Amino acid sequence: MLLLIDGVSRTYTDAHSTVHAVDDVSLQIAAGEFVAVQGASGSGKSTLLLMAGGLLKPDSGQVQVDGQDPYGLKPDARADFRAQNIGFVFQQFHLVPYLSVLENVLAPAMAVPGTEAETRDRALQLIERFGLSDRQQHVPAKLSSGERQRTAMARALLNQPKLILADEPTGNLDHDNADTLLGYLADFAADGGAVLLVTHDDRAVACAQRVVHLQNGRIDQAVASSA
């Protein structure tokens, strides 16, 4: 099992209230699977994704990526583990504004051993694959939304991850660019990777092999789980 989420919970407490953002959620995703998580705003989708990616430690329960518990690692080792095994794609792109397309795509390579020439060649291949060859020296401000998201997708794939976690990746895209991005994610799963995507977008849900519905931080078992 490439991603195992076993009974995870996360609670936020302040002076006025306690919010059970994710409440005893279990989920398994195998290599080759594309799974979408759907639910209303505040249902716990993004919190679940952050826990799956080693970015937010659950209060209880366990996460394993390819058999490894990232939260059992020291912070530096956990960051290296994420860089080597997980690609992230977000709605807001999170590109470094003063770096070019090529430099943004190359950014994750700092955490992974390898020759500079091989890594640069792989980055250039991804840039070409995503139709950005003529934009590789442009900074994000000079790119369209679709180009920024394709740059983010290329960056996510640079280190040849086993798992892609995507948080509303079509939220800032027009119809054509959204379909293109979803096609890339489907291809990644078809090639043996695993995809966990959280979304409000029905087009994204339609691309998934399996759909999980969250409500108030829990999986809604009453809603059909297949796309």
Image (cartoon, rainbow, N blue to C red):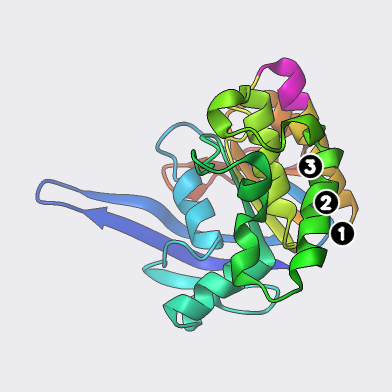
Q: Residues within 10 Å of mark 3 (few under 14, many from 20)?
A: many
Q: Toward which corner of the image does residue 75 lie, by quadrant?
A: bottom left
Between 74 and 122, the residue placed more toward the observer is 122
Amino acid marked by disc 3: Ile
Q: Residue furthest left?
A: 15
Disc 1 target residue:
192
**Judging from the image, what secondary structure is the residue with disc 1 in?**
loop
Which quadrant would the C terminus be assigned to in this image?
A: top right
Q: Residues within 10 Å of mark 2 (few under 14, many from 20)?
A: many
Residue 70, percent across and down?
54, 75
Q: Nearer the viewer, mark 3 or mark 2?
A: 3
**Judging from the image, what secondary structure is the residue with disc 2 in?**
helix
Residue 116 falls left or right of residue 19 = right
Residue 146 falls left or right of residue 31 = left
Q: What mark, if any, has residue 189 been given in the picture? A: 2
Find out whether residue 225 is within the magenta segment: no
Amino acid marked by disc 2: Ala
Q: Is residue 93 above or below residue 35?
A: above
Q: Residue at x 75, y 33 (%)?
A: 181
Residue 54, percent across and down?
51, 66
Can residue 4 be seen from the camera position used here?
A: no
Can residue 84 be seen from the camera position used here?
A: yes
Q: Residue at x 71, y 31 (%)?
A: 204
The Cα atoms of the two marked residues, 3 and 2, are separated by 20 Å
Find out whether residue 176 is within the magenta segment: yes
Disc 3 target residue:
127
Span shown in magenta: 174-179
Dot 1 and dot 2 residues touching (CB under 8 Å): yes
Q: Toward which corner of the image does residue 83 lie, by quadrant?
A: bottom right
